[in-house]
Image (spheres, rainbow, N blue to C red):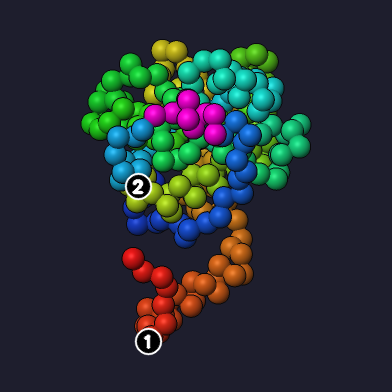
Amino acid sequence: MADPNTFHFTLPANNRPPLSELSEQLHPAFPFLTANRARSRGRDVFEVIDTVVIHATAGFATQHAVDTWRTVRASAHWIVPDEDEPQHEQFVWATVAEAKAAIHVRDVINVRRTVLGAGPNVNNRSLGVEIVNTQNVQDFRDQYSRWQVTATARIVLYAWAKYPNLKHVISHGKLDPGRRVDPGRQFPWDDFRQAVLSHSALPAPNPLMLEAAAADAAAEAAPHEGLGACTP
Ligand SMILES: [Zn+2]
């Protein structure tokens, strides 16, 4: 099995996916976590984000992760529910606003010594995804569902289209090898990477989205005269 402390791939700048919808719901703890378990990124969010960090929770349910974050100063931007939760195959939970830095990688890591290279603090430059999985609690035997892998790939595709400098997709284990092995050796990293790089995890676009895109292209060719939006 693959070593989770090596999980890492980069996103080619010439193969950016189209903008896609993310099937997410704001978790009831979103306001608390965004206000109390996240910090200012210190820079423009669209400029600074270059990394997505993949984690696993080491618990049985979304609520275990949220309860932990209520007691310790930690968080992530999304949680991907487990197969025995009702949200599985429906949506992922948004738990912290993307504009803020969630606290998901230990601050003491010297980023220059990681593959990310020079740049701001890992938390300031990244988005964090937690996948519900029991990890060492069940000796890494808790298999990831196909949907969990697809849903995680969709988060990356969504972010890749949205954040112009996004480049690295990396495991927590690779960023903190002395302390962490998540998402664990049973995470199908090769399938996940393939689903992202081939865009095969992209959801089908809403037909109204295609209509708007066509109208936008037409408007660019022949702008409307005398009609418009409210302007400052
Ligand atoms: Zn982690």
Establish if 219 lies above or below 188: below
Establish if 104 lies above or below 179: below
Quadrant where the C terminus lies? bottom left
- Magenta residue span: 31-39
Establish if 139 lies above or below 88: above
Q: Main secondary structure of the magenta part?
A: helix
Query: Which residue occupies 49% across, 32% down?
Result: 34
Query: Which residue occupies 61% across, 64% down?
Result: 206
State how far apart marks 1 and 2 are (Cα).
32 Å
Q: Is residue 75 left or right of residue 120?
A: right
Residue 53 disc label: none
Expressed as whole percent of the image width and height from the top left, the position of residue 20 reads 52, 56
Magenta-drawn stretch contains 36:
yes
Which of 59/31 is in front? 31
Contact, mark 1 vs mark 2 (Cβ under 8 Å): no
Expressed as whole percent of the image width and height from the top left, the position of residue 83 reads 73, 34
Q: How many marks?
A: 2
Expressed as whole percent of the image width and height from the top left, the position of residue 132 reads 63, 28
Q: Looking at the image, is mark 1 or mark 2 nearer the viewer?
A: 1
| Amino acid bearing label 1 | Glu
The residue tagged 1 is 225
The residue tagged 2 is 46
